[in-house]
Image: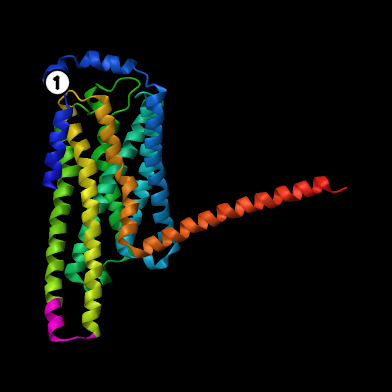
Amino acid sequence: MVRVFVFSSIILLCLVKSSKAAENGAEEEEEEDDVIFPISVTIPMGIAMGALILLAIVGNLLTILSFLKDKKLHTVYNIFILNLAVTDLLIGCISMGIYSSYDISSYHWHFGYHFCKTWLVIDFTLCLESVLIMFILSIDRLLLLKLGPMYTQKATNRKAYICIGLSWTVAFLLYSPAIIGYDIWTGHNPVEDGDCDVPFVNDVVYTSVTAVFEFLVPLIGISIISIAIYIEIRKRILERNKARQQSHNNENHASETKTRRDIRAAKFLAALVLVFAVTWAPYTICTVIISFSDHVYVTDNVYETLTWINWSKASMNPFLYALNSARFRKNFRELLCCMSKCKNHNKVGQGDLTVINRTEVLDP
């Protein structure tokens, strides 16, 4: 994870212009504001953004429908997965869906000041919630490994929903008050007309502190928990191998099956953390760099690209669910086959209707 963070920092430092370029930043910004993207740029942009939005919506919708359809998926762990899928679905619909019009319009916001505030509150809350729920997922796996049946008895669905409610409250409170009231408190809004950004974009202290709590603390916490999970699984494997040498019975076979399931869950969490680190590190570092506006300058193209890379996690997560869980894979296939059959059925129905209509015309 440290390598990912350092590598992202190096890339961004190469992309960011020096302080000398910052002196000409105002002129360059004016030029960028006047630029209208040609069709040769907007079409590929639209296709790329549309593909990410479609993957986020379809993939997470399949995850939600799988949970609702299959009672065997109604576990505490999968309730957290459901919440993550709902969050990612909303990111695809609201965050990515609305913002795509801003990018295609050559970085011009058409929806006004108040809608921008509302959109920012929703977007930042959703993005932070997706991070917090990963942290909760990691803790859930560690407690299950450490406590076993005792944790299974105490971790009820009701407690899972309470935990999710608290995480949404924290996600809302970290950014929303500042997004809503920062320019009112300071009496100054650095965001220009036709743009949509947080009013604390140039506040070094606030941006740095929130970046630490939103990205660095969860990343370090999840990494530590993942290491603890790996150590616990490793210890269980050694104990299982020792028991296997002493006896061969059904209990050992059940223990081996459980260990395999734990290993699969640990790999899934590791994949989630890796995707989170790769997609979020560049954007988070970039926002901190932008807050030093008097010394450095980041081009709009770089910032917008990193924003979409940040959101792309919502499109990737459903693939991780399918890779990790045979049950999710089965439900995905069934839902996709059902959709395909319904589509084919409608085509057949339309064909039959055409034949009937033609027959009616030919009849005397």
Q: Residue at x 22, y 75 (%)?
A: 256
Position of residue 148 measured from the top left corner of the image (x, y, whole percent):
21, 72
In the image, 337 versus 182, the foreground residue is 337
Which residue in the rendered view is the most extreme toward the front? 362
Residue 245 lies in the magenta-colored region? yes
Q: Find residue 151 and report its image quarter.
A: bottom left
Colour scheme of the picture: rainbow
Q: Where 223 sits versus 41, above or below?
A: below
In the image, 87 versus 340, the foreground residue is 340
Q: Find residue 19 and report its image quarter.
A: top left
Position of residue 1 measured from the top left corner of the image (x, y, whole percent):
14, 48
Q: Residue at x 16, y 18 (%)?
A: 22
Q: Residue at x 69, y 52 (%)?
A: 352
Name the chief secondary structure element in magenta: helix
- One can see residue 151 in this view: no
Residue 357 lies in the magenta-colored region? no
Direction from residue 302 to residue 292 in the image, left or right:
left
Q: Where 24 sits versus 230, above or below?
A: above
**Element type at marker 1?**
loop
Q: Around disc 1, counting alpha carbons within 10 Å, would you say few (fewer than 14), some (14 to 19), or many (20 or more)? A: few
Q: Find residue 235 and report its image quarter.
A: bottom left
In the image, 7 versus 57, the foreground residue is 7
The span picked out in magenta is: 241-249
Which residue in the rendered view is the most extreme toward the right? 364
Position of residue 301 measured from the top left corner of the image (x, y, whole percent):
27, 27
Count the numbered circles shown.
Answer: 1
Q: Which residue is mark 1?
A: 294
Q: Where 132 sits versus 182, above or below?
A: below
